[in-house]
Amino acid sequence: MCIRDRHVTFLRIQHACQLLATTDDKIEVIARDVGYASPFTFSSTFKKWTGIRPSEYRKSSSSAPVEP
């Protein structure tokens, strides 16, 4: 993955973190909103970058958010 692709992924995950913490949108909707056609690809990429699944992030976002 080139540096540009990594940066785009970082920005997508960062935006997803914001949406997960501030909306009740379904994970599938957030995946689409940040540029992923597949919620499965989004979830695996999110976990790779943050260490937790999007649903776990949403649960923990009220206490101590995990940033990518």
Image: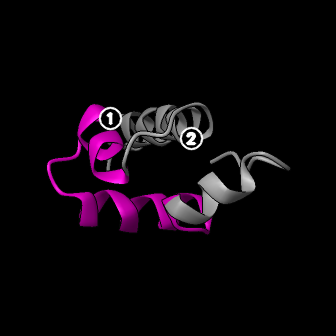
Q: Nearer the viewer, residue 32 or 4?
A: 32
Are discs 1 and 2 less than 8 Å apart at CB? no
What is the x, y in percent for residue 52?
60, 68
Answer with mark 1 or mark 2, whichever residue precedes in sequence. Answer: 2
Which scheme is used to colour this image of the protein?
one colour
What is the x, y in percent for residue 45?
39, 61
Q: Nearer the viewer, residue 50 or 25?
A: 25
What residue sits 51% from the left and 33% below the top? 19
Q: Amino acid at mark 2?
A: Cys
Q: In the displayed image of the protein, which residue is found farthest to the front?
A: 24
Q: Amino acid at mark 1?
A: Val
Residue 34: mark: 1
The picture quadrant where one finds residue 51 is bottom right
48 inside magenta stretch: yes
What is the x, y in percent for residue 12?
41, 36
Tell me which segment is drawn in magenta.
Answer: 27-54
How far apart are the alpha carbons under marks 1 and 2?
Answer: 10 Å
28 inside magenta stretch: yes
Q: Which residue is mark 2?
A: 17
What is the x, y in percent for residue 8?
37, 34
What residue sits 26% from the left and 67% below the top? 40
Q: Nearer the viewer, residue 13 or 9?
A: 13
Q: Quadrant of the N terminus?
A: bottom left
12 left or right of 29? right
